[in-house]
Amino acid sequence: MIASKFRGLVAAAVIAVAATALFAPLAHAATPAPGYTQFDGCPSEAENPKSEVCTRTVVDGGYFQMGSKNVPITKPITIVAGTNSSFEGFYTNSKGGMSKASQKVPGGVVGLTGLTWLLELLGSEALTLYAVTELAGTPDLNLFAPPIELPIKVHLVNSTLGNNCYVGSTSNPIKLNLTFGTTSPPPPNTPISGKAPEFSEEGEIVKFSNGTLVDNSFAAPGASGCVLTLFGFIPISLNGFVNEQAGLPSAAGNNATEENFNLELTSRERVYP
């Protein structure tokens, strides 16, 4: 049903990209042309000949809930990459991939660990906690063949937790399968629905705006690498505190995300004329 909804969008996007490729010169430089600088991060032909279409996705709202913690998405997350002409593959240069946007975690470190004595030791300002979503594998971001597969890990950022406090890893990622349609999660979660984006064109750029992707069928592993170092030399693992307070690890059916997004794409030859 989702495929049929997007058949017209796919055809329009493919025609637009093919037309720009036909009449544009081959890429010879890795500096985006004026009007296409937002695609900086998509490889030029010299950097990766497989990269034929440049894409830029911005997640600018929604939430990410795992276990008992729900983090609103208030800072835009940007993903810039190239694909082949069938919108397959995920190719980046040194400026591409997923941006590291810090989302403020309600309750801070105390809410995450339950260690109220940290307030007296460090003060509330020092205990502000941020969650940064990072890629933990190669995503499949083909908008025209959902679900969107996005392997991630969540970096919990605060000096109290050390520099390597994560939920998820490259070997054990949080595996999101995002859809515009309606989910079929295991209980106790119930189905939720996304929203198909609106199609438009602006010059040689194809746009998909105001869409919503959802998933509430994924599992979340326990925390790892969370270490409090007292007096500069006494390490105390906080993994157990984080897991107990946050309800981690959390089985599928107990987690959810809703991600409001905008996506734009164009021919690589337009980005690097």
Image: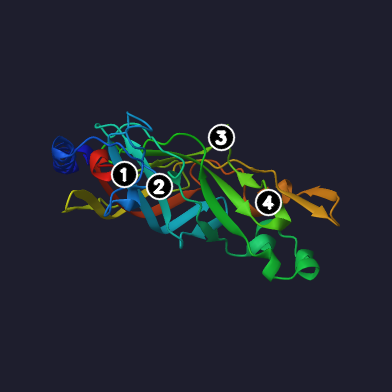
Residue corresponding to mark 4 = 242
- Image quarter of the C terminus: top left
Towards the viewer: 223 or 46: 46
Which of the marked residues, 3 or 2, is nearer the chain's N terminus?
2
How packed is label 4: few (under 14 Cα within 10 Å), some, or many (20 or more)?
A: many
CB atoms of marks 4 and 1 within 8 Å: no
Q: CA distance from mark 3 to mark 1?
A: 24 Å
Q: CA distance from mark 4 to mark 1?
A: 36 Å
Q: Give the secondary structure at mark 2.
A: strand
Residue 37 can be seen, yes or no: yes
Specify the amino acid type for callout 1.
Answer: Thr
How packed is label 2: few (under 14 Cα within 10 Å), some, or many (20 or more)?
A: many
Q: Position of residue 31 (x, y in %)?
A: 35, 45
Q: Position of residue 189 (x, y in %)?
A: 45, 48
Towards the viewer: 191 or 229: 229
Residue corresponding to mark 3 = 170
